[in-house]
């Protein structure tokens, strides 16, 4: 499981995280929502040790990672796969080479084993046969699928998604949402998704956390959020601006 305890993070005078507490159980699909700039991606980076907290702690399977050195963090990060917002593919490499990259970097598998794993990952994201293509030949949705295949190719325990449907049309976004659910169910991975897309919340989420003013403002099921009458939650879920913002 993943547990965050009283996490604080500032950049200069700006406090971004001001005491975040959350826990995600093994095999659970959790969603983190909140307004742009509220610190969702910053929180996600703490989960894999890309950032260290000023105060507080992050535990992965009961082990604190907040103060580990880089060598120890590498061992922890091997438990994680991550789909970045822009897929973060290497444009000079083929789809096959992009997905094989983390396997070759680890150096644990033969080329035959790597091919089997890459082909299996491509099949799982409905891109069988796309290995020879270059990223420039793919649509935005296909690039996201390749990024996901690379994230899951070595069968991580945890998969993190940073805005997986950003820049995609509603139909492609829906296909990505269902693909995330499929991966979660087939691989039994613990899933954490940062998103603004309320359709993704409804489709993917088992537990939802709302980050607001540096803390977890609300926690519950998707149904809890869609039925909430709390003014902050209600405005966000329904896309209604705060009158105070309009006054600015």
Image (spheres, helix red, strand yellow):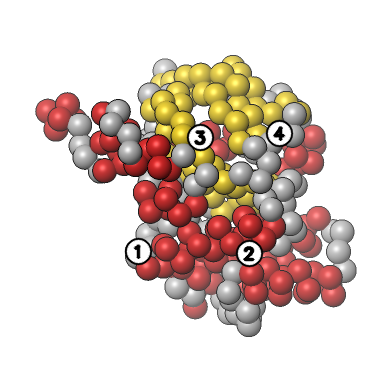
Q: How far apart are marks 2 and 3 (CA)?
A: 24 Å
Local crowd at mark 1 within 10 Å, few (<14), some, or many (≥20)? Answer: few
The residue pinned by badge 3 equals 42
Front one among 2 and 182: 182
Instruction: Look at the numbered discs 2 and 4 and tell me whether their residues touch, using CB distance below 8 Å.
Output: no
Let me know if residue 232 appears in the view.
no
Instruction: Describe the element under mark 3 as helix, strand or loop.
Output: helix
Q: Residue drawn 79% across and 62% down?
A: 104
Q: Earlier in the sequence, mark 3 or mark 4?
A: 3
Q: Which of marks 4 and 1 is nearer the N terminus?
A: 4
Location of residue 111 in the rendering, given as x and y in whole percent from the top left corner: 84, 72
Q: Which of marks 2 and 3 is nearer the N terminus?
A: 3
Instruction: Describe the element under mark 1 as helix, strand or loop.
Output: helix
Q: Earlier in the sequence, mark 1 or mark 2?
A: 2
Residue 235 picture quarter: top left
The residue pinned by badge 4 equals 60
The residue pinned by badge 1 equals 170
The relative height of residue 223 versus residue 177 in the rendered view (above or below) is above
Residue 247 left/right relative to 114? left
The residue pinned by badge 2 equals 149
Residue 153 left/right relative to 178? right
């Amino acid at each position: 499981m993943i547990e965050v305890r009283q996490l604080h993070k500032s950049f200069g005078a700006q406090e971004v995280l001001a005491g975040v507490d959350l826990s995600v159980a093994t095999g659970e699909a959790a969603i983190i929502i909140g307004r742009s700039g509220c610190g969702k991606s910053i929180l996600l980076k703490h989960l894999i040790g890309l950032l260290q907290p000023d105060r507080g702690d992050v535990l992965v399977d009961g082990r604190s990672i907040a103060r580990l050195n880089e060598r120890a963090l590498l061992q922890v990060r091997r438990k994680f796969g991550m789909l970045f917002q822009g897929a973060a593919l290497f444009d000079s490499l083929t789809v096959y080479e992009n997905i094989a990259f983390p396997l070759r970097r680890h150096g644990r598998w033969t080329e035959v084993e790597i091919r089997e794993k890459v082909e299996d990952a491509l099949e799982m994201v409905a891109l069988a046969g796309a290995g020879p293509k270059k990223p420039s030949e793919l649509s935005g949705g296909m690039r996201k699928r390749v990024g996901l295949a690379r994230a899951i190719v070595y069968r991580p325990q945890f998969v993190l998604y940073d805005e997986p449907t950003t820049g995609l049309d509603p139909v492609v976004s829906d296909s990505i949402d269902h693909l995330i659910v499929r991966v979660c169910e087939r691989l039994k991975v613990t899933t954490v998704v940062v998103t603004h897309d309320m359709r993704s919340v409804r489709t993917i989420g088992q537990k939802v956390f709302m980050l607001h003013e540096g803390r977890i403002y609300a926690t519950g099921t998707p149904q809890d959020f869609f039925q909430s009458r709390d003014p902050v939650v209600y405005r966000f879920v329904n896309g209604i601006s705060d009158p105070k913002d309009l006054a600015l």
